[in-house]
Image: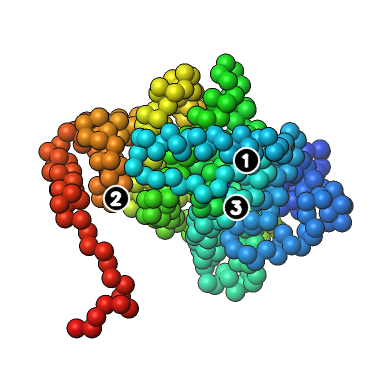
Amino acid sequence: MSDVPFGFGLPDRDPERRKDGDEPNPADPFGLGALFGGIAGGGSPEDVLGKMPLFAELQKLMNWSGGPVNWDLARQGAISQLAVGHQPTSQAEQTAVAEALRLADLWLDQVTELPSGIDRTAAWSRVDWVEKTLPAWGQLIDPLAEKVVAAMTSALPQEAAASFGPITGIMGRMGGLMFGAQVGQALGKLADEVVTSTDVGLPLAPAGTGVLVPQNVAEFAAGLDRPADEVRLFLALREAASQRLFAHVPWLRQQLQDAVHAYARGITIDREAIERGITEAMSGMEGGLDPSNPESIQQLLGSGVLEPEETPEQQMALRRLETLLALVEGWVDTVVAAAATDRLPGLSALAETMRRRRATGGPAEQTFATLVGLQLRPRRLRDAATVWAAMGQQYSADQRDRLWSHPDLLPTSDDLDEPMDFVTRQGIDDEFAQLTASDAEDPAPEQTPEEDRPED
């Protein structure tokens, strides 16, 4: 894998762009100038603060102690990218989104036994999307970032730690800034593209909230030659379907997060590279690790010390994550098609646009490629959709959706290689026969609360 987790390689420092005699600016040790339009890279701290209204105090960034990712920096960096062209939502958009999501739920009631997962509706601006999804991003990203920062600092030899004093603290703060800057860039880019709260494959809104992003919905519709309300309803169907799945399959969200975190547990640091940098510094060699010079830390971290070598366990976690995301997306495709085939004249064109978007790297692909180096393959999505469609045709929508009742019933990555074999396999017939018979003939007895049960 060529990219480090999160894509946290440091920006190139192109010498050809510097004036003759200029040296790297120590006020910009993390290469944040590009992120904030050059502001972070020049002038005294007072000048920098005067030019960055988003930052109340520079010290607040440097002394971040809220975790391995500086989320203040991530939020401010993302919002700064959205300043141009940002459109707040209007009351008319709020009403249109609410009506679309309500109608979508009515249609879905007819094609799946999973009940609605939406208690409230919302039309978010791009800035709203950034601010209101940060808690979900924190749960997903913090364990990964913590692993990288811990591995980075623990790789220092003990004898060197005594000589270099506070270097571990410097690395920790620097890691938080780097992660915050890079996450902020990623969230700003995603906020320009996402059309719903589940567009990246995970539910990012507060529980029970169905969301559309009207500004991005309008851009999605541009060039499709379809009525705006039809496009909005198509995307509302996808959001409402995803919300049903995550609301009523309680283990699904956790399994996705566990797969990401299982990958994180395998991240390692090239200890030899760090030891080599320290040895060179002690020997006075150019390129050595010098804690008094943040530029030397930047150069070391950008030299590949954070690049992991995938273990079999990590590869297994990535396959599991890829398969689960494909199964979620394939199920959504299937139930939306079932609900809208006779109702949306432009369904084929809209579905094809969504397929092209995924094939060229939509938000889900970009997000997980940035986070864990995962490239979702459209072939997996097509195979997953084939399974769900065939299950509904050969059995019933109810039996199809019962596969979500337990993770062991779902198709595996190997099953998706031959999706029709999974559907027609005799064992599947037996399992569904047992499930159906059990539900019809022997309903589960109502459980008595522990405190009300009579003593033996």
> Identity of the amino acid at label 2?
Ser
Q: Give the numbered dot on residue 123.
A: 1
Q: Are marks 1 and 3 in contact (CB under 8 Å)?
A: no
The quarter holding residue 261 reads: bottom left
Q: Which tag, 1 or 3, sits closer to the chain's start?
A: 1
Q: Which residue is mark 2?
A: 405
User: Which element type, helix, strand or loop, lies under badge 3?
Assistant: helix
Task: Quote the CA–CA distance across marks 3 and 2.
Answer: 29 Å
- Could you tell me residue 430's position as x and y percent? 13, 43
> Identity of the amino acid at label 1?
Ala
Residue 449 lies left or right of residue 329; in this view the side is: left
- Could you tell me residue 30's position as x and y percent? 68, 51
Residue occupying image coordinates x 55% and y 52%: 206
Residue nearest the viewer, comparing 245 with 30: 245
Q: Which tag, 1 or 2, sits closer to the chain's start?
A: 1
Q: Which residue is mark 3?
A: 134
Residue occupying image coordinates x 78% and y 42%: 38
